[in-house]
Image (cartoon, coloured by chain):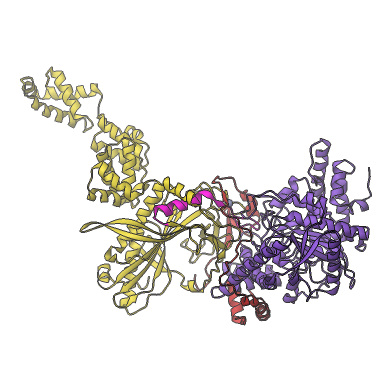
Chain colours: A yellow, B purple, C red
Amino acid sequence: MSNAQLTVPFDEAMTRYEPIIGLEVHVELGTNSKMFCSCATAFGAPPNTQVCPVCLGLPGSMPVLNKVAVESTIRIGLALNCEIATWCRFARKNYFYPDMPKDYQVSQYDEPLCTNGWLDVTVATDDGPQVVRVEIERVHMEEDTGKLTHAGGATGRIHGADYSLVDYNRAGIPLIEIVTKTVIGTGPLAPAVARAYVAELRDVMRALGVSDVRMEEGSLRCDVNLSLNEPGAGWGTRSETKNVNSLRSVERAVHSEIERQAGVLDGGGRVIQETRHFHEDTGRSTSGRSKEQAEDYRYFPEPDLVPIAPTRSWVEELRAELPEVPSVKRARLQSTWGINEFELATLVNAGAVELVESSIAAGVDPAAARKWWTGELLRVANERGVELADLPVTATQIARVESLIADGSLNDKLARQVFEGVLAGEGDVDVVIAQRGLAVVSDDGALLAAIDEALAAQPDVVEKIKSGKIQAAGAIVGAVMKTTKGQADAAKVRALLLDRLGVSE
Amino acid sequence: MTVAAADLIRQPASVLAAAISAGEVSSVEVTKAHLARIAEVDERVHAFLQVTAEAALESAQVVDAKRKTGAKLGSLAGVPIAVKDVLTMRGVPTTCGSKILEGWCPPYDSTVVSRLRAADMVILGKTNMDEFAMGSSTEHSAYGPTHNPWDLARIPGGSGGGSAAALAAFETPLSIGTDTGGSIRQPAAVTGTVGVKPTYGGVSRYGLVALASSLDQAGPCARSVLDAALLHSVIAGHDPRDSTSINAPVPDVVAAANRGDVRGLRIGLVKELSGEGYQAGVLQRFNEAVELLQGLGAEVVEVSCPHFDYALGAYYLILPSEASSNLARFDGMRYGLRVGDDGSNSVEQVMSLSREAGFGAEVKRRIMLGTYALSSGYYDAYYGQAQKVRTLITRDFNAAFEKADVLISPTAPTTAFKIGEKVDDPLAMYLNDIATIPVNLAGNCAMSLPVGLSPADGLPVGLQIMAPPMADDRLYLVGAALESALTDSWGHLLIEEVPDL
Amino acid sequence: MTAITRDEVAHLAKLARLDLSGAELDHYAGQLAVILQSVARIGEVAADDIPPTSHPVPVENVFRDDIAMPGLDRAEVLAAAPATEDHRFRVPRILDEEEA
Ligand SMILES: [Zn+2]
């Protein structure tokens, strides 16, 4: 990062250059078994316990394609408005790397299963939400590699490592690569478009149920291609930034790469074609190996796998079973929930649509569900720098809190404390309430004692109430709330004290 | 009853199986006889890389015990067999004739081995081969050459020289070979034995360490056509672990071998697979066999397959290309030889040093040839064009099978040559496969069977029968008829003439 | 088209991870040229409109049900490895000296 001083501030860069972006997103499918063998795919299993001759690339082993992986890919293609190939093959991509057991990767090269699609994404602008159509070039299948851990050296990174350790549990997990065509004309919206696209893809994957798309577990990974077009000077050379593994990082990676390339160009330099690595901590990328040019992958059709020829009837069957795509669904929810564009955009940007929906399904009132997810919970998520969906709180828990509010056991202030406890891992809703002693005081005996005390302290008010000035009861209620430290239900206190005085409203 | 060990080792597998199942001889006795023979002669023949005597005797005992319970036994139960060292067998070293895999014990059985076990056959051990099946002489084995029992100074063919020589030396009544360009058939031809390359997809490749995935096929090796058929029916059939395995019933090869009839059959002589380059003695025995077939009632027609002239070129581009990729995994990271891991070398250097030390000259040659053929800029001219030629060769076969039910040719252009004669002349070595390669390219099936000794050198000559895909039974129909007529004229199988070791 | 230089052989050897000696480079340069010259004959065949054959038998759509099954025993798998640590395969450092 010695050339960090060469960057040009984003807004300034935008006055001279037009960014051209391309996004390659890898999604790990959530199949039970791997792409070409029956090994399990559970995340976090002890190293090398989900391996077999096939995914270890042992001599003599042969791949057999997972049918659900193919179906998932076709469904993704259909959801992204792609054409589905009538005949396609796998190819071998040949290169040596210790995380790749066969020293070739089985992938689809020039015969992807799905091509020519699009995905509409919505970004917020000063003039309100704007829809941008991102065109999809291809959706293809490939196998994931094993996981390397670098040992020795100070950083745990590949640089400076003395040696590395390989766990092949991940090797052979089905990966889908979704490649966009170049996205042009977005101008200063480029970072937001990139983020919105990845977020939208994530929502599509979730809606399809083909992947759990947990970016922090690496089940959705993004590479950002970017070049700058200098009006009159033509398209620039593009860089490829890898390791962009959160929505926020996608936005930041585009942003910082625009600033970097503008700096290089302004300084009279040339952008070189290279792979760059994004660092979550700094929000910047560093140059990776630029010797990609020397690599020659020697693709050829994989002879151990036979061609895939999806029949029209199979594809139509899958199309008929497609769930509602998120954009259509959002339009429906907008009208069902009776919210405006802006409120919808807030939910979308917060990644809260599905969360609100599932909360409602769990019995929460729509307005309350929106209030929690875009209010208190979003605040905590932002504070922690995580996605809303990754907060350790469930729709069922929200429903429970809401029902306690409804029956008077909790009030808003207490509910916030309950969530604080749940998010801090103190336990489920009722456990937190019990441990923190958060319940609204509903014990009539305790309340009556507090009421009697207040009545005795304010005989003049008692007289007023008895003489028919029932609104004077507020003073007694306030006193009771004070003694119970807000943990009482005001309505109940009022009813009890009137009853005590034999007054009816 | 007791049978002299010397007799047991010379019996056909079909006879041994019948005797074992009838209780006339035990599998243990048969197994012991063969183990004794191996101990006696293999030092000179070197057909085996690994003899699994203990495990063999154990499985023989199991079969004998099973027989005593009255359980139904398979058609080859208790019969010993040798397996080419390119098929994985759990816990038994599988080296593929290479230093890079020295001592590697696979944690799983190949499907072929599983089926042999399921059929209660007794596996004697693993046989020698050219390193990773690259070669036609078994001289490219990292563990030293195998010698041809007909003349120990000569090659037994390759790559499956061990499996063929073990039969000719009476070390085993049956063996498994694999055939990528002739590695079952050419060794059969030069050792006076029978070898069949089944239809591609007919026998599972799961556990067969791949040389060229689109060409490789395991198959039976035997001393007679019927024995080959019995073994064929044990190992063939659909396997869900091999995506290229054909999901269809196996042709009834045993019935065909028992029937042996060529009356009314049209037999095509492939014009391009004779003449120039073929030894006179080979052609003479081949022509006599053609006449014999005519005498047996076959109609002999001449067919032309013009693109066969390009088969060798296409083959030596497709094979090295696929091999260069298949052999990439031998990088010293997960199993096998690792060289130079002293802390100073990077992973790339250790991989390169390991592969340099672990692979022999022929393997390196073909890896580089394949790497070249697949390189960007050369792909279309080499690999791409070779695949188109492959299509044309298949079309030639299709046209020829319109005119003939089976095609025939000499299996190999020459009889067994001397060890060392062609070892560093790759082109001369590659020519050995000229007649066997087209079948691998097209994926159909073929058999080699002995048709006599060349008058020039007294060494065996093989005849190749080729049939359309999934018509493997025709090979046996014709092979059995020809074998029977030849045996009648000689008074015995040709293999009986092999000199005493 | 079929001439192949020593440098090209060295490049192929690098791609194929073979640490060939100088003598081997010379030897293979000669042999590969001869072999390529011989196989290059296939270029004579007019095949522009001929579809390539990648698979010798026309089988399509072979799939496996998505059912997870237990794999290999880890101890057995790691026993075959040249080096292991922490239940993982141990491999030399990945970057060259000048990259590291
Ligand atoms: Zn596996």
Residue A60 highlighted magenta (yes or no): yes
Q: Position of residue C96 (x, y in %)?
A: 53, 71
Asked whether residue B176 is in view, the answer is: yes
Where residue B454 sits, quadrant-wise, is bottom right
Percent x, y for residue A66?
A: 54, 50
Where is the N terminus of chain C found, in terms of image quarters?
bottom right
Q: In the rendered view, would you say B77 is above or below A194?
A: above
Residue A452 at least partly seen: no
State the image quarter where residue B208 is shown.
bottom right
Question: Residue placed farthest to the top in the image?
Answer: A502
Q: Report the residue at 71% width, 50% height from top.
A: B250
Judging depth in this view, the residue of B468 and C2 nearest the camera is: B468
Q: Which residues are magenta?
A: A55-82
Residue C70 position within the rendered picture, expressed as x and y whole percent measured from the top left:
59, 45
Please state if A339 lies on the left or on the right of B40 as rendered: left
In the image, is residue B485 part of the stretch drawn in magenta? Answer: no
In the image shown, does B204 or A125 lie closer to the viewer?
A: B204
**A117 lies left or right of A489:** right
In the image, B204 versus B51, the foreground residue is B204
Residue B203 at x, y percent in the picture: 70, 54
Q: Residue at x 16, y 25 (%)?
A: A494
A292 versus A208 height, above or below = below
Q: Is residue B153 left or right of residue A189?
A: right
